Image: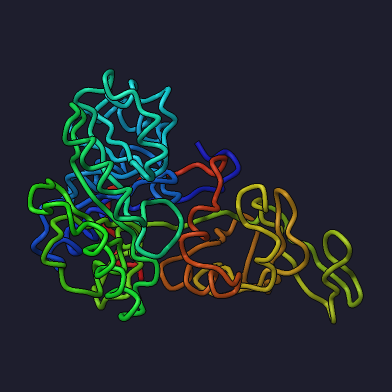
């Protein structure tokens, strides 16, 4: 219940639609991983996860064991891959809950108690240039592969991460490096090979040696392709007070905004504690489908919008409107769309709608 009338609207059917459209566009894969980490990129709720599965994803990927177990409370019949490293003291929990782990290094692999992890599923992360997680030495990879072959742990997959999908040369170099690093592994015997996330999956043909891909931000409408994907996320608040300023009056902390003439300022109950950080000052929100600018220093729980006589108390304020608005906000903040969505905190309730919207 959004008691302060500040909430996120999540369009569940739009998420399902987007997944269906992406899979139709990117045909030929056997495994479509729905990346649902960071609470489904700020959308929250296992209802979102269920719609992603309904849309056609047959494997899930999360960041942490906590995220995986949250899904397992309601959804038992789909495999889940943890993309981050899980401390080996918790691996029995993974085994019990059908959660696949990532092996990022020989050092980590050697720390595993292979005798007590029979039937645990693992994917080996290959570092092809991002230099985050993963193995970038073919000898280390060969050692892990040989040891796994003699153990009861199940090597289910190999994967990498394309770190600059818009650069064709760098992407091709990463795919080549993947093949170089895995040259001593019979790839046809590996059940799942997944290399590409949203952008690379949409921009390039399926690599012949891959049978899986990972869908992340694209499921929520953001893609470099020409697909007509639908918005899935809208952040709404309302006007709780109108302040009528005279020339020279200031607004908020440090008097960061000063009225140049008689002006009307709307006070809105959302602030940086909700994820609307102070750098949002100067960008636009929507009231009655008209654009109005955020002014003054954003407070922990409230912000200020310069409005006109056409607005009134309790008018809805659309703080994040749609796909294009998120892109505008990201540009204003000098960041990416992911951060805009993921920054909206847990104290902002999510309201889930099954009705498909055609708003763009």
Figure colour scheme: rainbow
The C terminus lies in quadrant = bottom left
- Tell me where residue 181 appears, x and y as whole percent: 27, 59
Residue furthest toward the right? 248
Residue at left offset 19%, top offset 26%: 119
The quarter of the displayed image where residue 346 is located = top right
Residue at left offset 60%, top offset 52%: 275
The quarter of the displayed image where residue 298 is located = bottom right
Q: In the rendered view, does 353 fall on the left or right side of 191? A: right
Against 291, is 301 above or below?
above
The quarter of the displayed image where residue 75 is located = top left
Q: How many marks?
A: 0
The residue closer to the viewer here, 199 or 229, is: 199
Q: In the rendered view, does 349 fall on the left or right side of 300? A: left
The residue closer to the viewer here, 174 or 50, is: 174
The residue closer to the viewer here, 200 or 56, is: 200
Residue at left offset 29%, top offset 40%: 81
Residue at left offset 38%, top offset 47%: 40
- Tell me where residue 332 appears, x and y as whole percent: 59, 74
- Tell me where residue 6 appears, x and y as whole percent: 56, 48
Residue furthest toward the top? 116
The residue closer to the viewer here, 54 or 264, is: 54
Q: In the rendered view, does 307 fall on the left or right side of 31? A: right
Against 97, is 297 above or below?
below
């Amino acid at each position: 219940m959004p008691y302060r009338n500040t909430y996120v609207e999540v369009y569940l059917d739009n998420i399902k639609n987007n997944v269906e459209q992406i899979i139709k566009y990117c045909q030929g894969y056997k495994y479509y991983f729905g990346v649902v980490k960071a609470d489904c990129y700020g959308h929250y709720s296992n209802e979102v996860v269920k719609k992603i599965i309904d849309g056609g994803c047959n494997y899930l990927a999360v960041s942490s064991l906590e995220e995986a177990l949250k899904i397992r409370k309601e959804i038992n019949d789909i495999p889940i891959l943890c993309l981050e490293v899980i401390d080996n003291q918790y691996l029995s929990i993974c085994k019990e809950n059908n959660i696949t782990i990532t092996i990022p290094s020989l050092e980590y692999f050697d720390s595993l108690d292979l005798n007590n992890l029979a039937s645990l599923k693992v994917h080996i992360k290959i570092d092809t240039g991002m230099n985050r997680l993963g193995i970038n030495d073919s000898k280390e990879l060969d050692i892990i592969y040989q040891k796994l072959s003699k153990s009861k742990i199940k090597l289910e997959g190999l994967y990498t991460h394309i770190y600059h999908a818009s650069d064709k040369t760098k992407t091709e170099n990463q795919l080549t490096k993947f093949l170089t690093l895995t040259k001593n592994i019979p790839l046809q015997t590996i059940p799942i090979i997944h290399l590409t996330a949203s952008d690379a999956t949409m921009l390039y043909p399926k690599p012949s040696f891959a049978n899986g891909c990972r869908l992340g931000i694209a499921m929520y409408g953001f893609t470099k392709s020409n697909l007509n994907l639908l918005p899935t996320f809208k952040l709404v608040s309302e006007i709780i007070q109108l302040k009528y300023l005279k020339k020279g009056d200031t607004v908020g902390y440090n008097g960061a905004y000063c009225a140049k003439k008689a002006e009307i300022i709307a006070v809105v109950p959302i602030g940086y504690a909700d994820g609307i950080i102070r750098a949002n000052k100067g960008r636009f929100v929507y009231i009655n489908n008209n654009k109005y600018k955020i002014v003054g220093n954003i407070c922990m729980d409230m912000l200020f919008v310069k409005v006109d006589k056409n607005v009134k108390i309790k008018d809805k304020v659309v703080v994040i409107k749609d796909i294009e608005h998120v892109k505008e906000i990201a540009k204003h903040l000098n960041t990416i769309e992911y951060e805009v969505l993921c920054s909206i905190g847990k104290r902002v309730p999510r309201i889930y709608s099954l009705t498909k919207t055609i708003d763009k």
